[in-house]
Image (cartoon, helix red, strand yellow):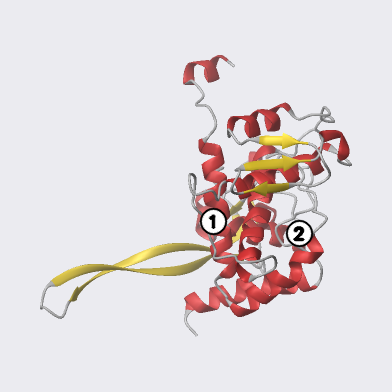
Amino acid sequence: MTQKLDIYTRVTNKIIADLEAGVRTWHQPWNAEHLAGRITRPLRHNGIGYRGLNIILLWAASVASSYMAPIWMTYRQAQQLGGQVRKGSKGETVVYADKLRKTETDDNGQEREVAIPFMKGYTVFNVEQIDGLPEHYYATAQQMPEGIERDEAAEAFFAATGADIRHGGNRAYYALEPDYVQMPPFGAFENPEAYYATLAHEVTHWTRHRSRLDRDFGRKKWGDEGYAQEELVAELGAAFLAADLGLTPEPRDEHAAYIASWLKALKNDKRFIFQAASHAQRAVDYLHGCQPMIDEEDEAAA
């Protein structure tokens, strides 16, 4: 089996096993113990966040090994920083996509350059597996204060998207043709986290409109593969946004109803989770792109 197929299979099998056990790999039990923050995407050695599927892979690894620190690096990066991975430590595989370019001769004898996409994996270690790194990699934070009832940063983020968000009734959904998000009233939710997690899910759906990302998986009816793919994109998008906004993603009530369709799709197509994670990252990037630009002078003054 090629390395590309091996990566697809290993990642998909892990997520299938989690779902069959009733666990969504992308929902981490958050903690407040590391300096990097209460909730975060997994971070590279230079503080840059991982993207797409790698977020899910490293969240799952953190849960499995009870890592509190969100920072990961390669063996060589650890050495360059003066650290040493402890003997016997097991690394985690992360992936990246690239294109191999080669020259081919067509039927007319003309040479042309073609790009061949491929997937490659490499191994990273959590800083808790590494000794001798600079002290700030191990620093812990003070307990964060309890948040106010409404999260001002989250409110501003969703308002800046420009989405038509309406409140009322007892259902949360995105209506494609009228192009609006419907939410129950804020006070109808058990806690603020549940409200913002649901809103993040529906606003991720909102990005699929043809005037935005024009995302269409050929869904014809509730529960088909196209439906499952879009729901998984919204699930992942909500989890990524929760990490970016410092929120705790809450399970949605219909979670159990989706698991069967996700499992079926994952078992039928090893690329399903990779494609969903890629679309989710694109949706989150789009939503971040809706935010107002911060003036560098104002940011420095703050």
Indicate the quadrant where residue 246 lies. top right
In what element is the residue under mark 1? helix
Q: What mark, if any, has residue 63 been given in the picture?
A: 2
For label 1, count other residues whose C-alpha is less than 10 Å away and answer few (under 14), some (14-19) or many (20+). many
Is residue 93 in view? no
- Residue drawn at x 52%, y 55% is 215
In what element is the residue under mark 2? helix
Label 2 vs 1, first from the N-terminus? 2
Pick the front one: 226 or 272:
226
Pick the front one: 175 or 156:
175
Residue 145 vertical position relative to residue 249 in the rendered view, above or below: above
Q: Residue furthest bottom?
A: 1
Residue 87 vertical position relative to residue 133 in the rendered view, above or below: below
Amino acid type, callout 1:
His
Residue 225 vertical position relative to residue 236 in the rendered view, above or below: below
- Residue drawn at x 48%, y 16% is 297
Q: Position of residue 190 (x, y in %)?
A: 89, 42
Residue 157 vertical position relative to residue 270 in the rendered view, above or below: above
Q: Position of residue 177 (x, y in %)?
A: 59, 48
Q: Residue furthest front?
A: 178
Q: Position of residue 155 (x, y in %)?
A: 70, 30
Tell us which disc is closer to us: 2 or 1: 1
- Residue drawn at x 68%, y 72% is 14
For label 2, count other residues whose C-alpha is less than 10 Å away and answer few (under 14), some (14-19) or many (20+). some
Residue bearing the label numbered 1: 279
Pick the front one: 127 or 254:
254
* Cα gap from disc 2 to disc 1, whole angstroms: 24 Å
Q: Position of residue 59 (x, y in %)?
A: 69, 57
Please indicate whether residue 19 sits to the left or right of residue 267 in the image.
Answer: right
Amino acid type, callout 2:
Val
